[in-house]
Amino acid sequence: MLKKKNKRDIKRFSKQELWSIIDHSNLPKHVAIIMDGNGRWARARMLPRVAGHRVGMESALKIVEVASDLGIKVLTLYAFSAENWRRPADEVGALMKLLVEFLKRELISMKKNNICFQTIGRIAGLPGWVQQQIKWSIEQTCQNTGLILNVALNYSGRLEIVDAVKGIIKDIEQKGLELDKLDEETFSNYLYTADLSDPDLLIRTSGEMRISNFLLWQLAYAELLITPTLWPDFRQREFLQAILEYQQRERRFGTIGKLAQSK
Ligand code: IPE
Ligand code: IPE
Ligand code: MG
């Protein structure tokens, strides 16, 4: 484990050094990422926003690879929010095309690396040709037992909660679910993430200090890590830095913490 005084050195370590310092027995099980800043990356280079999304897709491919190599159990990527439909139609169209391209390219490596592809969000609201590719990727990888690559598409944390409440009411009316027995665990089972543990670490790139309607319920006790790096520049080395920083946090879950206990 890295000593506190060496914390500032994290930024200087190479990928190999970071790999060897990381405590591989204390990895976050579930890492969620808000991949933000593609537009600003493009604007800084006087390129169209779509160029930022294209390079951002390369970052996503690289991050999936390192998360899988590291042995992370679940990686959730926020790729398209339910609010992102408010963007210009040509940008939305380009994002959909890039998503399908990502899935096609990723399929080969998912098969090779035992990665299982899943989605969260209202998939039925996506264009048919995008849905088809999603279905194909799930079918082709759902038996895999390694990293779960969970991509949030047409996703809204509030809508997810609304959908959960609808599911609960339906089961009260039709399956005899008892209202008195409804607790946090039962509620969680009605969310899109029913089969997944809550994220241990949330990374947001591009420096924005908000969660933009992402995993509102599930992030209750996640460690938050916000980096100014724009998503197209966020690559494997910085992901490993984030894991190392996570390992230096003390997660208290409302308790007084280890230091106070030892006094
Ligand atoms: C994130 O980058 C990608 C999506 C939201 C799909 P942005 O497109 O939001 O980039 P900025 O925030 O405008 O820089
Ligand atoms: C959040 O980024 C959604 C995704 C990364 C897919 P946005 O760029 O849409 O978030 P806001 O609008 O800045 O909050
Ligand atoms: Mg943004």
Image: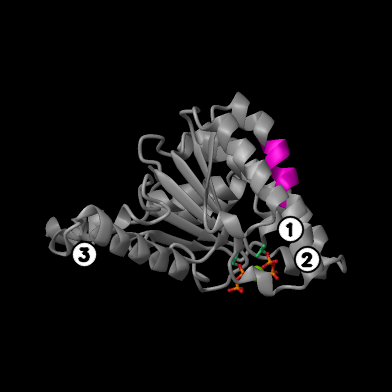
Whether label 2 lies within 8 Å of ligand 1 gets the answer: yes
Looking at the picture, tell me which residue is in the foreground, 90 or 257.
90
| Residue shown at the point (60%, 41%) measured from the top left | 135
Q: Which residue is mark 1?
A: 95
Mark 1 surroundings: few (<14), some (14-19) or many (≥20) residues within 10 A: some
Q: Which element type, helix, strand or loop, lies under badge 3? A: loop
Residue bearing the label numbered 2: 91
Q: Main structural element of the magenta stretch: helix, strand or loop?
A: helix
| Residue at disc 1, CB closer than 8 Å to ligand 1 | yes
Q: Splitting the image into 4 quarters, where does residue 132 fall?
A: top right
Sequence-earlier tag: 1 or 3: 1
Q: Do we see residue 251 in this rendering?
A: no
State the image coordinates of residue 21 (x, y, percent, origin top left).
46, 38
6 or 41: nearer the viewer: 41
Task: Judge whether 31 appears above or below 138 on screen.
Answer: below
Image quadrant holding the N terminus, namely: top left
| Segment tinted magenta in the rendering | 99-106
